[in-house]
């Protein structure tokens, strides 16, 4: 999901707001706050495809009739977390939860296109998807997918949301903030632009020091920028960084921490070092190119062509649709890495489960556990207290799951050889002679 969303992001003007690009080259006055284009449509539809094609895959009665899908999913011990295990105590809750998940994946994407109350409805829908993904992450260990699913929605937040955030941040203390910098120092100009952008202080005013002789004297005296608040208090050096953080609607908790004696001392030392070594002659960036907000007809056609291609690619992955892609046609998706299949927990959640036991026989006949975490402990067939904890991470669990497939059983010998090499390196003189690999259900 991360891969395909980053592909569509290539065509989006994300650099014009809340970015390094916008901090170094602010958009011109009057630049639009909302963009509607083929690329924005493609990005939204890719998000929609994830959920709608997942629903089309979920044809089992566990999803559509019995409402037992969440129950089965939380019984997959190699993925479930303690929170998921706790929820199994409430079977009466799991059935409506199953239907809620299924229908939210159907209706949620539709709400992103709501023609009425677009801002509030889309924002609430995105919050719903974020809670949906974070709920999955709290109950099951399935890698970074829930977090990518949550982050992907942030690009869909409407102007209404950002305007509300902007209005809430317009306090008197923030509106009265001014920063003065050395206009001959490109590094200084870049730094204050980055602070304004990433401290979320869009209304802070930036001025060259030459407009006020008293400011310029203080700047020379302290070899520092100058930050003025609404009460005309002046801050220099690292104290100015703390003052800016204190007024940030997002990072204000950091200000109290950085005011601690040893933290403040380190900060002042670093600021002084940077101030002495900054490159005064560093060239300023060029002004932003507003034409980047628009795509040419050829670019629009290319994006729409690929979107249609991805739509039919997803249809071809579904069973019994009759749509087939030739290898030559599929090569487009593989070259651009737009290949995708959204069959999570489908046709129904996994029902086979178990844990691995990997005994190895040493030269002297002793049998040891070759699991790298157990490091030669006594081999036992007892069920682990938490099967999901027996895997180092999601990637190892996925790799071992794949080894169960008969189509790639030849790869098992390579994993066995790896375990033997790892054991022999860690236990010099204790050589593995034979290895057996079991999955106990």
Image: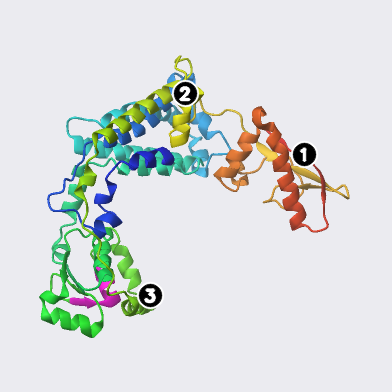
> How many marks can you see?
3
Closest to the observer, 42 or 11: 11
SS class of the residue under badge 2? helix
Which one is earlier in the sequence, the residue at label 3 or at label 2? 3
- Magenta residue span: 234-245
Q: Is 215 above or below relative to 405?
A: below
Does residue 131 show up? no
Q: Residues within 10 Å of mark 2 (few under 14, many from 20)?
A: some
Instruction: Tell me the tag on residue 397.
Output: none
Left or right: residue 397 compared with residue 71: right
Disc 1 marks which residue? 436
- Residue in the image at 21% along x and 57% along y: 287
In magenta segment, residue 236: yes
In magenta segment, residue 109: no
Contact (Cβ within 8 Å) of mark 3 with mark 2: no
Contact (Cβ within 8 Å) of mark 2 with mark 1: no
Disc 2 marks which residue? 317
Disc 3 marks which residue? 263
Left or right: residue 49 compared with residue 122: right
Q: Is 260 above or below relative to 361?
A: below
Q: Is 306 above or below relative to 152?
A: above
> x%, y% of residue 219?
21, 80
- Residue in the image at 70% along x and 33% along y: 410
**What is the chief secondary structure element of the magenta stretch?**
helix
> x%, y% of residue 192?
24, 66
């Amino acid at each position: 999901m991360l891969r395909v969303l980053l592909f569509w992001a290539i065509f989006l003007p994300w650099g014009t707001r809340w970015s390094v690009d916008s901090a170094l080259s602010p958009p011109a006055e009057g630049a639009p706050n909302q963009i509607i284009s083929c690329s924005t449509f493609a990005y939204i539809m890719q998000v929609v495809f994830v959920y709608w094609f997942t629903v089309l895959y979920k044809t089992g009665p566990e999803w559509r009739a019995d409402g037992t899908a969440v129950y089965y999913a939380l019984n997959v011990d190699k993925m479930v977390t303690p929170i998921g295990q706790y929820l199994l105590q409430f079977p009466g809750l799991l059935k409506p939860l199953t239907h809620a998940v299924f229908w939210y994946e159907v209706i949620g994407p539709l709400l992103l296109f709501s023609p009425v109350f677009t801002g509030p409805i889309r924002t609430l829908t995105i919050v719903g998807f974020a809670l949906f993904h974070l709920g999955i992450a709290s109950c099951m260990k399935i890698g970074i997918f829930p977090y990518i699913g949550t982050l992907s929605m942030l690009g869909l937040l409407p102007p209404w949301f950002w305007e509300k955030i902007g209005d809430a941040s317009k306090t008197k203390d923030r509106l009265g903030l001014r920063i003065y910098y050395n206009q001959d120092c490109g590094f200084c100009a870049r730094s204050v632009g980055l602070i304004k952008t990433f401290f979320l202080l869009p209304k802070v005013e930036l001025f060259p020091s030459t407009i006020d002789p008293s400011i310029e004297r203080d700047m020379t005296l302290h070899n520092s920028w100058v930050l003025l608040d609404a009460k005309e208090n002046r801050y220099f050096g690292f104290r100015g960084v703390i003052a800016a953080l204190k007024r940030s609607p997002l990072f204000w908790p950091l200000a109290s921490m950085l005011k601690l004696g040893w933290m403040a001392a380190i900060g002042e030392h670093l600021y002084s070092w940077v101030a002495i070594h900054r490159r005064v002659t560093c060239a300023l960036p060029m002004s932003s190119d507003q034409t980047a907000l628009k795509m040419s007809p050829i670019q629009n056609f290319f994006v729409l062509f690929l979107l249609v291609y991805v739509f039919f690619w997803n249809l071809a992955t579904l069973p019994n649709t009759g749509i087939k892609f030739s290898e030559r046609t599929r090569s487009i998706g593989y070259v651009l890495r737009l290949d995708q299949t959204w069959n999570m927990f489908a046709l129904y959640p996994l029902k086979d489960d178990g844990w691995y036991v990997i005994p190895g026989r040493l030269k002297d006949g002793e049998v040891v556990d070759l699991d790298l975490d157990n490091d030669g402990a006594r081999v036992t067939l007892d069920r682990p207290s938490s099967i999901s904890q027996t895997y180092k991470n999601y990637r190892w669990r996925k790799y071992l799951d794949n080894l169960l497939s008969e189509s790639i059983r030849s790869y098992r010998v390579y994993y066995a050889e790896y375990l033997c090499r790892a054991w022999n390196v860690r236990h010099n003189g204790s050589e593995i002679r034979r290895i057996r690999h079991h999955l106990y259900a």
